[in-house]
Amino acid sequence: MSAGLIALLDDVAGIAKVAASSIDDVVGHAAKASAKSAGVVIDDAAVTPRYVVGFAAERELPIIAKIAKGSLKNKLLFLLPAALLLSLFAPWAVTPLLMLGGAYLCYEGAEKIFEMIVPHKAHAHEEKIKPETTDPEVLEQAKVAGAIRTDFILSAEIMAISLAALPEGSFWMRASALALVAVAITAGVYGAVALIVKADDIGVALAANESENVGGSISRKTGKGIVLAMPWLLKGLAVLGTAAMIWVGGGIILHGLEEFGIGAPAHFVHHLAEEVAHLVPAMGGFLEWLVSAIGSGILGLILGFALIPVVGSIIAPLWKRIFARSS
C-alpha cells in the first residue's frame, strides 16, 4: 500500500473522529436544551388531547398525526431558522415576538373559561371570529388548524428556551442541536398524546381477555379500570391544558416585562414563591413552582379576558376585512 494512500486513510480516520465527536456534542447539547424546556413540553402534551375530544374514535389518530406533522413543520421550517437568524441579526426582536405569542395563549385559555362561565356570550363571540359549522370535515380542519396555531406558540417558547440553553458554538452545531430537539420533543409529545387518547381502546382490549388464569383476571380488571378512568383523565387534561395556556402565556409576559425593565410583577411573584417555599422546606420546590404558576396564571387570565373584547370588536373584523380585500 502506498504511503499516499496510508496518509489519506489516516486523514479520513481523523475526520471520522472529529465528526463522531461533533455528533456527541450535538446530542449532548440537544439533551441539555430539551431538559431546560421540559415544563413547556409538559404543557404542550396537556393542551393537545382536548383537540380530539368529540371526534369519532377512528379519526383520533389521523387528527393527532396531522397536528404532529404541523408541529414538526412549525419547528423545522419556520421556528428553527427564525430563531437562529434572529439570534444573529435581531436578538432584540425575540422577546416582543414571544410576548405576542404569550398574549395569544392567554386569550385562547381565557376564551375557554369564558365559554364555561357565560356560554351564550361566548357563542356570540365565537360567531364574530369564526362562524359555526356542522360539517365534520370542516370542523376537523378548524380543530387541527387551531391546535397547530397553539402549538406554534408553545414550540416557539421551546425553541427559544432550547436556543438560550445551548453554549456558544458554530452555526451548524446549534442548528443541528435545535433540529434534534425539535424532532425528539415532537415525537415524545405526540407519541404520549396518541397513547393517552387511545388508552380506552387498550382498556377495552384488556377487558376482553377471556383467559381464566390469574393473568386473565388481572388483565380484565386493569382494562375495566382504564376504561372507567379515561373520561375523567381526558376531562382533567382538558382543564390542565386550558390552565397551561394561561400560566405559560402569563409567564412569557412576566419575563418579557422584566426584559423591558418592568420587573416589579415578576419580582413580586418570585419573592412570594420563595417565601411560601420556605414555609414547608420538604415541599419547597413544588410550592415555589405552584405559586409561580398561579401568579403567572392570574396575570394571564386578566390579560386574556381583557383581550376577548379587543379580538371580537377590533382584531377579528380587521382580519376579515384584510382577507376579503385580498380574495
Image (tube, rainbow, N blue to C red):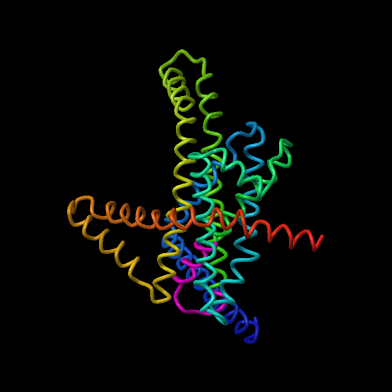
Q: Main secondary structure of the magenta part?
A: helix
* Residue farthest top in this picture: 212
Residue under the point 60% across and 49% down: 147
Can you say which quadrant of the picture contains the N terminus?
A: bottom right
In the rendered image, residue 159 lying in the magenta stretch gets the answer yes
Q: In the rendered image, which quarter contains the C terminus?
A: bottom right
Residue plotted at (64% across, 66% down): 78
Picture coordinates of residue 265, whole percent (x, y):
34, 66
Q: Quadrant of residue 316?
A: bottom right
Residue 298 picture location, percent across and down: 39, 54
Please identify the residue farthest to the bottom as the structure is shown. 4
Asked if residue 253 lies left or right of residue 73, the reply is left
Vertical side of 79 occupied by 283: above or below:
above
Give the magenta-colored segment's residue range.
156-173
Q: Is residue 207 magenta?
A: no
Q: Residue 238: x percent and y percent?
A: 49, 41
Instruction: Report which quarter residue 39 is drawn in.
Output: bottom left
Q: Quadrant of residue 60?
A: top right
Depicted 208 relative to depicted 317: above or below: above
Foreground: 114 or 72?
Answer: 114
Q: Is residue 191 above or below residue 60?
A: below
Picture coordinates of residue 233, whole percent (x, y): 45, 34
